[in-house]
Amino acid sequence: MELEEAISATKGHRLSTLQLRMDSQKNTKAKAMHSVSIVRGRFRSNRSTFDMEYHHISKPGNAKHIVQPMTLLQLWFFKPLLTSGKDRESKVKMMFDREVLLLSTQKLKDIKKMITCVTDEALLAEECSECPDLPQDQRAKDVFKSSFFFIDDTFYVDESHPSCKDLSEPIRKWASGHRTGVSADMQVESMEDVTMESLNIRLGYPYLYCHQGECEHVFLFSDIRLMHDMDNKDLAGYPMMINKCEARRIHCIVCNVFTAKWITREDSFSPNDPSFFCDPCFRMLHYDADGKKLGSFKAWPYTDANIFS
């Protein structure tokens, strides 16, 4: 049934929203723009939400199934805050990263496992154009393990490893001597034993996750509901990622096929600065058969954030 017939069959013709929808369908230009938007992925997140949420199949065998009514929480995570320009506070760009569904009985440390960030996966390596074969397997998350959640004027710090430090201490010390919009009675607790049902949260209110010293992720609770028949009853399936943004890798500028693994600056072989190369192209272009450096450039191992999405 066409939209006009549906409207005339009901008494909804007085609704301005339906009238606008009908006018847009009559407009051929609007139809063309709508189809282009779908091709470019503007509405792709809505389709992938259904696919990711309802295609989680319970594992056979000794899977522990949920039999009693449970409360589910839906969280939106955003990518690390990016600022540009001189006014760093007025040009904050918020970009959606992923959507997670979890049980109210789960803990904050379970949420942390669902947050994937390139700053954790970044290789700790210095400029290595002279010796590209040096071992470079140490990542930032293996060295700097500290992190915290800031929810309802409380810092929930990570104490899972002896090397973890309280990253909130300098923040609380600074806030105590300045007038801020944050309450002066900020508390500090461990995230290890805090469950979601024990938190005092507000839907749609922004909260903070901080790691690697200053990498900040804003997240919010978008929905709280009871589990229904269509939900996955496998306890091991939670937390469950039900939506994520479309990831676009940075390709090698030579072959344009493989993901970049090297970044160069001041490269005499490339017109771009910086330039990105996959490992085979990087070595064939910048080194001779004996592994000797050719030309002038600076190089660092590069980690593409989208390969972890």
Image (cartoon, rainbow, N blue to C red):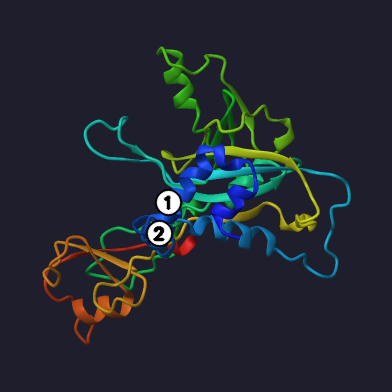
Of residues 150 and 57, the one drawn nearer to the viewer in this rendering: 57
Q: Earlier in the sequence, mark 2 or mark 1?
A: 1
Q: Judging from the image, what secondary structure is the residue with disc 2 in?
A: helix
Residue 110 shown left or right of residue 18 in the figure: right
Q: Position of residue 90 (x, y in %)?
A: 30, 30
Q: Which residue is under mark 2?
A: 31
Q: Viewer-proximal residue, 272 or 284?
A: 272
Relative vertical location of residue 37 with respect to residue 77 in this rendering, above or below? below
Q: Give the amino acid at mark 1.
A: Ser
Instruction: State the quadrant of the N terminus.
Output: bottom right
Local crowd size for mark 1, using a 10 Å CA cut-off: few (<14), some (14–19), many (≥20): some
Question: Can residue 113 be seen here?
Answer: no
Q: Residue furthest right?
A: 67
Q: In the image, which disc is placed on residue 63?
A: none
Which residue is rendered at x = 34% and y = 69% of the image?
A: 261
Residue 143: where, in percent of width, then height?
Answer: 48, 50
Residue for point 81% across, 54% down: 229
77 sits left or right of 56 in the view:
left
x, y percent for residue 277: 28, 71
Residue placed under numbered mark 1 in the picture: 24
